[in-house]
Image: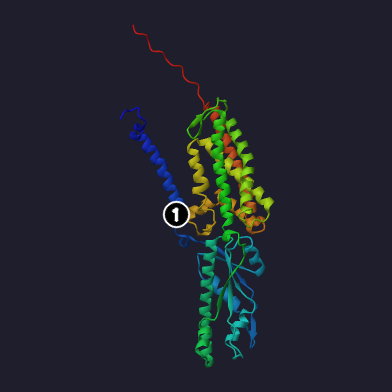
Amino acid sequence: MSPTHPFAVLRTRPLWAGTGVILGAVALLFSLFYLGANINPSGSVRGLPVGLVNADRGITVDGKRLAFGEQAVTAITKEAHREVSWQVLDQKEAEQRLGSGRLYGALVIPEGFSASIAALGGPAAAGPPTRPALTVLTNPSASSMGSGMASRITQQAAHSFSLALGTKLSQRAQAQGGQSGAAERLLLADPVAVQVQDGHPLGSHSGMGLSAFYYALVLVVCGMLGANVVNSQVDVALGYAHSDIGPWRRRRPLLRASRVQTLTVGSALIAGLSVVMATLVLAVAAGPLGMDAPHLPLLWLYSVGTVATVGLGALALLSAFGTPGMLLVTLVFIAMAVPTAGASTPVEALPGFFRFLAEFEPLRQITAGVRAILYYDAQAQAGLARGWAMMAAGLAGALALGFGMTRFYDRRGLHREHEPKAAVAPAAAA
C-alpha cells in the first residue's frame, strides 16, 4: 500500500497508541467512578442520619413507674451500629428534618406505648389485648436507597427490642403462674408490631423521589453540550474552523481574535442561550410531562443559573486545554458527578474517596437545590442555600480559570493562527 494512501494511517503506531491510551483511560475512569462508588453501598454506609422519637410518657402501676419508651431508646442507641447515626428528637423536630431531607427515616415510639405493653401482662380483658406498635417513617425524597437502608435498620432495631421485651414479659408471666393460651404466649414472645409509613409523602409525578436528580442532570447535560456547540460555532463564525453539513464544507474568512476575545464571545453566547435551554427544559417537564413543580419562578431562575454556570465551566476547560478539554468536561460533570450526586445512593453509603468528591462535585450541589425547590418548599436549609453558594463559587472559578489561562496564552504569544513561514528557495545549481 502506498504511504500516501489514506488507509496507510492505520499502519502508524502513533494513531493506535494515542487513541488507545485516551479511550482506555476513559473506559478505566468511568468503570472506577461508576462501579467503585455503587458496587457495595451496604458495606460502605456510615452514619446514616435516622431520627428516634419517643412520645411515650410512661405510666405508674402499683406505685412503680413504667417507661418502656425510654427503655426502647436506651436499648436502641446503646447498641453499636456504624451504619446509622441515631438522632433523638421530639415529634416536631423529626417532622421538620424529614421535611427538609436531613433524615432518611425515623422510628417513632407513640404516646401510650407503656400503657399498651402493661396491658399485655395485666388481668384478662373482655376482648383480645391491643398489640403495641412502633412506627417506621421512610423518606424517599432524600434518597430512595438511603430511605430503604434506614427502613431496614429501624425495623431490625424495633424487632430486636420487641424480642428482648418479649423475653422479660414471658418470664414475668411464668413467675405469676397464670395460665395462657398459645396465642397469648406468641404475643408475649414478640409483643411489638412494626408499622411502616411514608414520613414525607411526595406527589405521583415526582419520580418516587428521583425527579429532582434527573431534572438536574438534564440541566447539566444542556450546559455541557451547549458549551461544546458554542465553542465550535464561535470557531466557525470567526473563520478558525470549517462548517460541515453533510457533504458540504465551507469556511468563512478569518476574523483574527485573541483567545480572550474568543472566550468572551462564547461566554456571552452560552449565557444568553442558557435562558432558552432552561426555559424549554422547564416547559417540557412541567407542561406535557406533568412533573410536580412548585415554585416555578424560582425553579426557572435556578435552572438558568445552572445551565449558564455549567456551560461557562465547560467553556473554560475547553479554552484552557483545547481538544482534551471535552474529556475533562465529561469526567468532571458526568463521570465523577453522577455517582456522587446522592440521588439513588446516599452520600453516607459511598466509599471515603467518593464522599470527598461529593463535597464539591457540581451535580450533587445542583441536585440538592432542585430537590429543595421540588420537595421541601424551597427551604434554604434543605440544600437551596448551599446550591446557590456553590453555583456562585463555581461560576467565579470558571471565569477565573478560563480568562486567566487565555490571557496567559495571549501574553505568551500562543495565538491560534500563526503567520506562515517564508519558504526558503533552493540554491541554484552551479
How crowded is the residue under tag 1: few (<14 C-alpha within 10 Å), some, or many (20+)? few
Residue 369 in view:
no
**Is 324 rendered above or below residue 163?**
above
Asked which quadrant contains residue 15, the reply is top left
Quadrant in which the N terminus appears = top left
The image shows residue 312 at horizontal and vertical percentages of: 59, 40
Above or below, 275 relative to 358: above
Residue 308, given in percent of the width and then of the height, sits at 61, 43
Taking depth in this image into account, of 67 and 153 the one nearest to the observer is: 153
Q: Who is closer to the viewer here, 409 or 337? A: 337
Q: Give x and y (percent) for residue 214.
A: 56, 53
Taking the spot 61% from the left edge, 82% from the top edge, the residue there is: 116
Residue plotted at (40% across, 44% down): 24
Asked whether the viewer can see residue 210, the reply is yes
Q: Which residue is mark 1?
A: 35
- The residue lying furthest to the left in this view is 1
**Quarter occupied by residue 397:** top right
Where's residue 53, x and y in %?
61, 71
Numbered disc 1: secondary structure: helix
Q: Amino acid at mark 1?
A: Leu
